[in-house]
Image: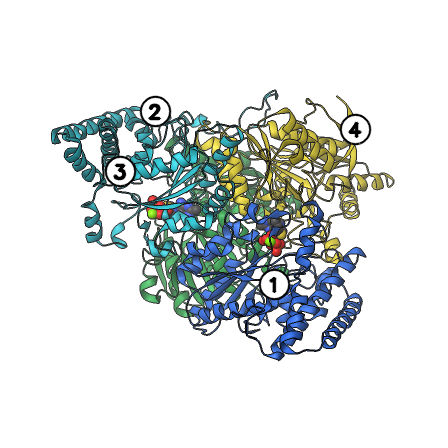
Chain colours: A blue, B cyan, C green, D yellow
Amino acid sequence: MGSDDGPPALSAAEALSAYTVMVQARAVDDRLWQLSRQGRAHFVITSAGHEATQVGMALAIRAGHDYVVPYYRDMALVLALGQTPRDLLLHAMGRAADPASGGRQMYGHFSSRARRIVSGSSSVGSHLVHAVGLAFALRIGGERDTAVVTSFGEGATAEGAWHEALTIAGIQRLPVVFVCESNQYAISMPHHAEVPVADVALKAAGYGMPGEVVDGNDLRAVALAMRRAMARARADGGPTLLECKTYRLRPHSNADDDRRYRAAAEVDAWRARDPIGRFGEVLVREYGVAPAVLAQIAGQARAEVDQATLDADAAPAPHPATIADHVFGTVAGAAPRSEDQRHA
Amino acid sequence: MGSDDGPPALSAAEALSAYTVMVQARAVDDRLWQLSRQGRAHFVITSAGHEATQVGMALAIRAGHDYVVPYYRDMALVLALGQTPRDLLLHAMGRAADPASGGRQMYGHFSSRARRIVSGSSSVGSHLVHAVGLAFALRIGGERDTAVVTSFGEGATAEGAWHEALTIAGIQRLPVVFVCESNQYAISMPHHAEVPVADVALKAAGYGMPGEVVDGNDLRAVALAMRRAMARARADGGPTLLECKTYRLRPHSNADDDRRYRAAAEVDAWRARDPIGRFGEVLVREYGVAPAVLAQIAGQARAEVDQATLDADAAPAPHPATIADHVFGTVAGAAPRSEDQRHA
Amino acid sequence: MTTTEQTLLEAIRGAMHDALAWDARVVVLGEDVAVKGGVFLATDGLLERFGALRVIDMPIAEAGIVGVAIGMALHGLRPVAEIQFADYLYPAIDQILNEAARMRYRSNGDWNCPLVIRAPFGGGIHGALYHSQSVEALFTSTPGLKVVVPATPHDARGLLLAAIADPDPVLFLEHKRLYRTLRGPVATGQGATVPLGVAACRRPGRDVSIITYGAMVHESLRAADALAHEGVDLEVIDLRTLVPLDRDAVLATVRRTGRALIVSEDNLTGGFAGEIAAVIAEHGFADLDAPVRRLAAPDVPAVPFSETLEDAFMVSAAKIMTAARELARY
Amino acid sequence: MTTTEQTLLEAIRGAMHDALAWDARVVVLGEDVAVKGGVFLATDGLLERFGALRVIDMPIAEAGIVGVAIGMALHGLRPVAEIQFADYLYPAIDQILNEAARMRYRSNGDWNCPLVIRAPFGGGIHGALYHSQSVEALFTSTPGLKVVVPATPHDARGLLLAAIADPDPVLFLEHKRLYRTLRGPVATGQGATVPLGVAACRRPGRDVSIITYGAMVHESLRAADALAHEGVDLEVIDLRTLVPLDRDAVLATVRRTGRALIVSEDNLTGGFAGEIAAVIAEHGFADLDAPVRRLAAPDVPAVPFSETLEDAFMVSAAKIMTAARELARY
Ligand SMILES: Cc1ncc(C[n+]2csc(CCOP(=O)(O)OP(=O)(O)O)c2C)c(N)n1
Ligand SMILES: Cc1ncc(C[n+]2csc(CCOP(=O)(O)OP(=O)(O)O)c2C)c(N)n1
Ligand SMILES: [Mg+2]
Ligand SMILES: [Mg+2]
């Protein structure tokens, strides 16, 4: 159901636009690795291979309405939610105009209050509790028909904070969809060294919520499962744990050498199942899209990324004098104090 | 199997000695509440109601051989492992001779290195990881045929550290038996506000280990389930999660007023199922023990506790000059340093 | 504005009650806070008055409690989370310091975390190692978090209301020994907040400045009364807020007396008393007629249970008198 | 005893290698430490040499890693746990401070916890808020835990071996910027440990004492070399161990120069520099010819990413020169 062999679950427009975002995401990822090799980006963390999972998720999210609490690998997700390649390049290069953090966080820490994309730290697993709190707040505020989505790797499911988030969501039956981007590795460690069971989805049973395994390289399967889970959440039917099985096609980050811990043959086998190529074939076969259209989309993505790179390169770095901005907000009615913020 | 209606699973000697410990534990508990009302014990935390669970556990533990990592409610357990009423009263009164802590910890923090009973903090759920580390050490050291037991309330299963302990034990298939003394409440909060599923045992599925619900007020049922789990652990068959359903018959501690959150009728209903009375009936009915013997056991327990109270009362408090002892150990080969330990 | 006599506990409960009543964004959450009304009854009656959506019993998951409060705050609520004892803040430290304190900065001001974390702390109540700790030193080194320690019922109410109104995370440490033993006048009414970051002079004096906070304010005042008979005149400064620290008040008192005794219930090494001493050493050097002195608990891992050991641990009026007398004579 | 040239990273790896080889009780555990050999390759090759029972890949569960190490230590092993970045020590703080540091004391000496927790810390490597933190201030206020910060390859090896041999928990903070950039002679051999709690004078000088640790030792030495041309003679003290603090060495250098500049990579308020300043203010008052001065990072929540902001954050030789020059002139 909803897999590559099932009936088309997406309209042609949805399918084409999803494909476009996937291609765009890969083009941004390609560029970042290039910039890293050139010493122009200090930190790169890949989303290559996760595009079907992330863009599939976005197909069930109403951007700016539902809250999204992502993790560092979710570049394709935030693109699908409306961030632009330029936003991402500004972020990667640490520019003042970086919309995620004004150049304060390293790449992969996506954020936009306007889009309800929540700022995260780098601490694995620490953000799910925020998703649960947002869902609680929606209930308290009586904001109906809205859900919260949060994502993480399978390695993160070992963290204590992960457990506390699912426990609270389960007890309170809150409108949260927990999406595991289950990519077989946590940096170097294979699934069996990170997770005591074959499927992360099996963990759902301990939290009183449904758990489901999805082919994370199948855009439509992800979209359908996500829509079911989001519908349940919006209808006050409680949380869901979705495990999207996928694969990270590149090293963990630019600091990683994945040849130390996995065989080239394994990576190659997954490359053959690249979610973008796979969905491209679906477009041609089932939606009757001409291969030339796909080539055009790829070309346009590259051009956009080129322009974004130029823009980001030319954008100014944050001014050193702003270093102590936004430590605290302004207290209403308080007189400004002379306490010096800078001592260095 | 092994329940009140099954075949006798314990020898007569085992059964009688188990009963004796249960009675002794209740007598100590009674005394502690009395001392608390008299202002002679600052802190009391009850084990009343948990005796069958705890003494049943002990029937599967080889004292001083298997490690035990208990929690604050495990007084009957440590009695069964060889602690004496005098030890417990010295502990409750904070005497220098308190074997658990030399008067440093409040009552309920049992410990004895000689007996392989591990010192705990008051932080709920923080001790299970130590049990896992001990089990790991046994494997590394090649100490076979030895297992680790750790216990906790159902409320503790919400803690992150609880999850991390079970995750690591599950991944490594370590010889640990996790025993939940599932007593329906965490201080004031009923099971459904603490645990997202009906049975804590259901959580085992997420950790790749068997989970089992046991009637925690049935000494033999607990002993049998524990023996199965310990046998599995000792044979390198991996960890087990055992949930012993029971009830705390008194307030959480002397600082608690349980009338604020539970009905007297509920407490009374459980009082009727008191594990000690219930096992006493088994002794009479199945083991042919004369009721007078039970009365004698009770009398002897009271006498022992009286003597223990006198002893503890007369025992000296820790000397103030010892306050800075045991902050650090002695470094082999290091010259003593003049660094002052006391500044007050 | 009316004034009533309240215990510290009543003042805190009243502040939460009124905040819930006045501001629909305020919610209270924690272990045992709803049905039971809190293990110290600090939230007693709030569930009945405001309902289960705003007074929330949470499972035993401190990181979860603070993390959920962060999520609520991100949506614009004003959560007041209780951690049952300050000793159990540790499992939530990642959420408090890495998440709440750093949220505004890391998002360049796009997000903020207006939440309050209340926790009873402090010793002298036979609570032993894990129900007696002074934990403030763990929280005063991360800019982005404010740390408040009220010493009077009036301040407890006023500072808690200010903390709830504050746009940033505030750790609010309540000395549990004072909950019921301390009574005093409390100004109620919506305007009666006490601003964060402003110390109070509890007793003017000429000879030695005592700089302290929490329960030690009262030990210090007792010592001051007793020493007055010996002709030693102590000034007692109650910091009220540790972060932001009222450096001006600290330096001003040293300027007046030339002698500073910092009194802390925490153990000495690495404690917040060191920060105060450092500020004086750096910026009040020329005013000092004697070395700065810290009076703190001995450097042991935590407060032991038995009365003999607990007494040896706790800083008391008597110990303050000895230290202040010595300093006055320097 | 032979001496070889090694980087800081090689010295640390070598110490673990040799400890594993010499003592069957030693085990190494952490995330990615076995198959990958650590994200910085600090444990590279150890799995191959010592096997999967002694070099253990652990899931992403910091409280679990430290807690398991505690359990191992209770049984008599000597675990060396790696936390991948010091920024991720937070989820393990309850285990480190409430459990490991308090185990010996709470059991009246019956149990002890001989374990080492290694963690890369520090900024200047474009690691941003969560890969650059200086976290020592969170760990220096709880007696029962030792805190070590080596500044040279020789010390890294010697202190790590001493930490592994120590009967109590030790937090071992390694400055990641020095891992590969710093080379130096290292005495190998089983006896070449460096005792915990003893500072080193890296450069004798007459005018100003710089008291520091970690990467700031090298910035300070650079500043000292440069200032020598201006006729300002700096003494540089490398604390090496923060707990226990070598108070004697701190007070002795102040006695020699009369001027103390404490240099810290951490932000100012609440940092460990305050403790050092306080000790000097209390016990070295009579020796001071000028106020104690702390040079630290600005009070912001953590190190920002972009180079402009990171440079503004980091204390550098240039900033040390300015501060030392001013202090020398006082
Ligand atoms: C609390 C914490 N511990 C460790 C790390 C270091 N770290 C960063 S990513 C990562 C692996 C995460 O694996 P997984 O959750 O499976 O996500 P993936 O990267 O595979 O998408 C680790 C260990 C961290 N960032 N935070
Ligand atoms: C980390 C932590 N949080 C909170 C507490 C306060 N506390 C002590 S016992 C308790 C309830 C524990 O309930 P449960 O685990 O079910 O065990 P029970 O007491 O019912 O046997 C709580 C919340 C604590 N000791 N430690
Ligand atoms: Mg992964
Ligand atoms: Mg319970």
Q: Given the image, on which type of amino acid does mark 4 rest?
A: Thr
- Mark 3–mark 4 CB contact (< 8 Å): no
User: Which label is found at residue D4?
Assistant: 4
Q: Is residue C298 visible?
A: no
Q: Which of pointers 3 and 4 indicates the residue nearer the eye?
A: 3
Residue B309, x across and y down, in percent: 26, 28
Q: How many marks?
A: 4
- Left/right placement of residue C138 relative to residue A83 reads left
**Mark 1 close to ligand 3, CB under 8 Å:** no
Subunit ID for the residue under disc 4 = D
Judge by depth and name the residue closer to the eye, C243 or A260. A260
Residue B316: image tag: 2
Numbered tag placed on residue A217 in the rendering: 1
Classify the position of the C terminus of chain D by image quarter: top right
Q: Nearer the viewer, residue C135 or B302?
A: B302
Q: Is residue B65 visible?
A: yes
Eyeballing the image, is A142 above or below B26? below
The circle on residue A318 is: none
Amino acid type assigned to the residue bearing label 2 in the image: Pro
Secondary structure beneath label 3 = helix
The image quadrant where one finds the N terminus of chain D is top right
Within-10-Å neighbours for mark 1: few <14, some 14–19, many 20+: many
Image x and y of residue A143, in percent? 46, 73
The picture quadrant where one finds residue D212 is top right
Quarter of the image for residue A236 reads bottom left
Secondary element under disc 2, as helix, strand or loop, is loop
Which is more foreground, mark 1 or mark 4? 1
The three-letter amino acid code for the residue at tag 1 is Asn
Label 4 secondary element: strand
Q: CA distance from mark 4 to mark 2?
A: 57 Å
Q: Residues under labels 1 and 4: Cα distance? A: 51 Å
